[in-house]
Image: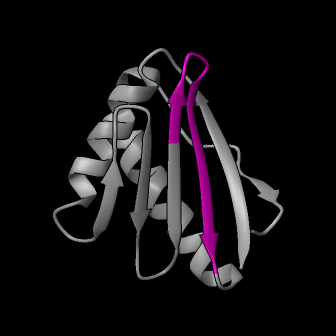
Amino acid sequence: MIAATAMLPTESGGKYLVQLCKHFAHRIDVSYSDAWGECRFSCGTAVLRADGDGLHIRTTAPDEAQLAETKSVIESHLIRFAFREKLQSLDWVEAAAD
């Protein structure tokens, strides 16, 4: 597995986490609370964590193509839901695999 992380500094991290998870739950397996969520896509997994600093995202997938797809799905929806943040993209960083 390979992984990447990103963080959105915001006071609305919990709101976006719940919004993303509720949205994805209509099509994929999702578990979440107000401060933690896990979205299991066919291409990979995204773990979301909200705290006072913002929304932290960790994606994992078996290969680069699937990781790129997982990141793209999360990012495109977050940009749409967080339009007030004027977010254009996330700064993804390679992370150590589990």
- Residue 71 in which image quadrant: bottom right
For this view, does 63 lie left or right of residue 96? left
Q: Tell me the residue at 37%/21% (across/down).
A: 84
> Could you say where residue 20 lies in the image, as x and y percent from the top left?
32, 46
> Could you say where residue 64 lies in the image, as x and y percent from the top left?
70, 80
* Prevalent SS, magenta region: strand
Residue 54 is inside the magenta segment = yes
Residue 15 is inside the magenta segment = no
Q: Tell me the residue at 27%/39% (across/down).
A: 19
For this view, does 64 lie left or right of residue 57? right
For this view, does 71 lie left or right of residue 4? left
Quarter of the picture containing the C terminus is bottom right
Q: Nearer the viewer, residue 56 or 90?
A: 56
Q: Tell me the residue at 74%/74% (across/down).
A: 2
Q: Nearer the viewer, residue 81 or 54?
A: 54
Give the residues in magenta.
49-61
Render colour scheme: one colour
- Residue 66 in which image quadrant: bottom right
Q: Is residue 33 above or below residue 3?
A: above
